[in-house]
Amino acid sequence: MIKKLLIANRGEIALRIHRACKEMGIATVAVHSTADSEAMHVRLADESVCIGPPAAAKSYLNIPAIVTACEITGADAVHPGYGFLSENANFAEILAAHKITFVGPSTEHIREMGDKIAAKQAMIAAGVPVVPGSPGAVSDADAAGIAASIGYPVLCKAAAGGGGRGMKVATDPGALAEALATARGEARSAFGDDAMYLEKYLGHPRHIEIQIMADAHGNVVHLGERDCSLQRRHQKILEESPSPALDDAARREIGRIVTKAMQKIGYLGAGTIEFLYEKGAFYFIEMNTRIQVEHPVTEMVTGIDLVREQIRVACGLPLSFRQEDVVLRGHAIECRINAEHPRTFIPSPGTIRNFHVPGGLGVRIDSAAYAGYRIPPYYDSMIGKLIVHGRDRHECLMRLGRALDEFVIDGVETTLDLHRALLEEPDFINGNYDIHWLETRLANS
Ligand code: ADP
């Protein structure tokens, strides 16, 4: 069993991991940049180590500094959270070489799923339906022929893509060369890898993802879905579980397909298999080999602590539950609260003056912010998540409304008002939205 775990992250997810460790009797080590020395994860952890200056490349992405922090503190495991080094196979390999447990899947799976072309091929081989597209990477020369065979519109996507970058739509043959070149350029500068593939661009899908957990004893369990269709620039804003668009039969069927595929590839740990869902059909787009921002909605409807299970399976322990123990109860919605202007989405770093969070039955706040906290300008703008649970979607929406009304964050702009406005939208209230709905709504208001 792990005795001391180093949390290679910051913000709310660092706190989330700390909390799971405390409940398991595991000591925690926080790492931080010089910009985060006052941060809540540093204050709560049993020990902390400064690993570098503010720029993430020199601190939270600094592998030698993090490995050194493990050696100094005697940490025997690392949880990478999401973002930063969470999907860096090289990091996992270096930790293994130092006999430090990486809380995550095997380096082979991180590598394979990190390359979206390889991931799609692996999923096809494992019997998972995928978005129709090019069989592999495309060159500028053969793109037009392949796009014509897929049929327009097509989406040019980066093999190394993430965070919605390196993606451009071509609506017709005349637009292909430019879309491909733009996406390629973006991918080269963002990921240092400009390999591109083509996919059929689906017009009105929902984004539905399946959470799975797997242990080293051959057990793979799925924990239902999350609907993450409310997006802006391919970035999720609000997530819910269950999806208003799925019935029990569809849920069971996709759960069965995904579980079988994960068993086939021998996956370990937490994973999310992302799909687009249109006209009753699922199309795989990518797999994330880490805990996700939106994992709390799954925890609220299943009652299962996913971070705790991640740590258990990383130690070689079996999952603490079986498929038949997973019962989806009620409905949960998560709102991402970003320090951004609610209409322009321009980041708003600064000092939070007042911070009053809602409470009461079915309300959960995952945040590392507090009154007096200075949001540094160096990292992403998410300052917290409000997660609400109700016995059904209606109760959940009512509860969300009153929780948003109670929430006070002064001193910086936040997206709280965007979420409040969503609750006035009949389409959202009725669960009637696809991945384009929010952008169209914002453009028309
Ligand atoms: P990233 O890793 O950059 O987040 P994803 O492949 O997960 O990229 O896609 C992110 C979002 O982009 C999806 O949720 C969806 O909104 C949109 N998207 C991706 N592929 C397609 C497609 N083939 N057709 C339409 N939209 C897509």
Image (tube, helix red, strand yellow):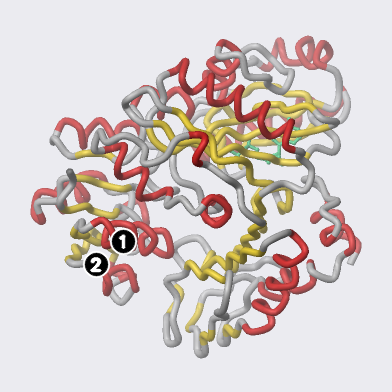
The percent coordinates of residue 212 (x first, y second) are 50, 35
What residue is drawn where x is 64% and y is 46%?
226
What amino acid is labelled 2 in the image?
Ala
What amino acid is labelled 1 in the image?
His
The quadrant where ligand 1 appears is top right
CA separation, marks 1 and 2?
Answer: 7 Å
Q: Quadrant of residue 136?
A: top right
The residue carrying mark 2 is 45
Q: Is mark 2 within 8 Å of ligand 1?
A: no
In this view, the residue in front, 389 or 296, is: 389
| Picture layout, residue 192 above or below residue 330 | above
Q: Which label was assigned to residue 406?
A: none
How busy is the neighbourhood of tag 1: few (under 14 within 10 Å), some, or many (20 plus)? many
The percent coordinates of residue 329 (x first, y second) are 61, 53
The residue carrying mark 1 is 18
State left or right for residue 73 relative to residue 403. Answer: left
Quadrant of the rendering where the C terminus is positioned: bottom right
The reply to whether discs 1 and 2 touch (Cβ–Cβ < 8 Å) is yes
What residue is drawn where x is 74% and y is 18%?
132
State left or right for residue 317 relative to residue 258. Answer: left
